[in-house]
Image (cartoon, rainbow, N blue to C red):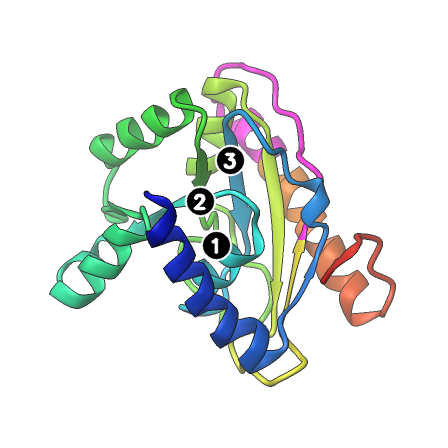
Amino acid sequence: MNKISTWLWRTAFWLRYKVGYGLKIYGRDNFPMEGPVIVVPNHLSNNDPPICGYALPRHVHFMAKQELFVNPISKFICTWLGAFPLNRGAIDKVAIRHAMGLLKDHKVLGIFAEGNRQKSGKLGRFHDGAASIALRTGIGIVPVAIIGSYNMKRGKVACIIGKQIPVEKAKATPEAINAVNDLVKAEIQRMIDSYHENRVEETLWK
């Protein structure tokens, strides 16, 4: 993605989320500024990818549900922003290869481990994809907590970026996948709880 395109979408997201809704971003200094990274945010609404994309200092290539690539307009927007389709009904080897290629090129891969939006606001079950890729590559996961993106009330929307959780390269057994998922899920829950209890440890980015 060239600098003009990046400036355009970052400006658009700044106007919508920062200016329009008073988005608060915490922990931006936690994010690795070089090398391959896997980002795992929680998922509340369709606002999550642009909020996360704007909040993080590097461009994120999100796995997105295949349905978003059926409509020409949403397909154009998703492709323009660097997202790529995932068939959630089966093991999508094409999407996995693309994800591995992004990491090999030292880019940032974004995966919503819950798969579907959790309208209850509570964390849902984490699927295997992000943890499996992390184990296969030995690349750490940055947990991200998104708050308030379902109701979108001004001053009530936040994005907290946690410290990268190291993952050692290993066979992606069910036990290993569950262990990684448990670590990431616990850290996201910690950040969500800290926000609601007014004790966020991460630095506010202005």
Q: How far apart in space, not on screen, are marks 2 and 1 (Cα)?
A: 6 Å
Q: Which of the 4 quarters of the picture holds residue 59?
A: top left
Q: How far apart in space, not on screen, are marks 3 and 2 (Cα)?
A: 9 Å
Using the rendered image of the protein, determine whether residue 31 is visible from the camera's viewpoint: yes
Q: Position of residue 126 (x, y in %)?
A: 51, 47
Q: Which residues are magenta?
A: 161-180
| SS of the residue under disc 2 | strand
| SS of the residue under disc 3 | strand
Q: What residue is pinned by disc 1?
A: 53
| Image quadrant where one finds the C terminus | bottom right
Assess whether mark 1 and mark 2 are in contact (beta carbons under 8 angstroms).
yes
> For the point 56% across and 28% down, which residue is it?
34
The foreground one among 170 and 37 is 37
Circle 3 crowding by C-alpha within 10 Å: few under 14, some 14–19, many from 20:
many
Q: Amino acid at mark 3?
A: Ile
Q: Amino acid at mark 2?
A: Val
> For the point 70% across and 55% down, which residue is it?
189
Q: Which numbered marker is on residue 38?
A: 3
Q: Nearer the viewer, mark 3 or mark 2?
A: 2
Q: Position of residue 153 (x, y in %)?
A: 59, 85
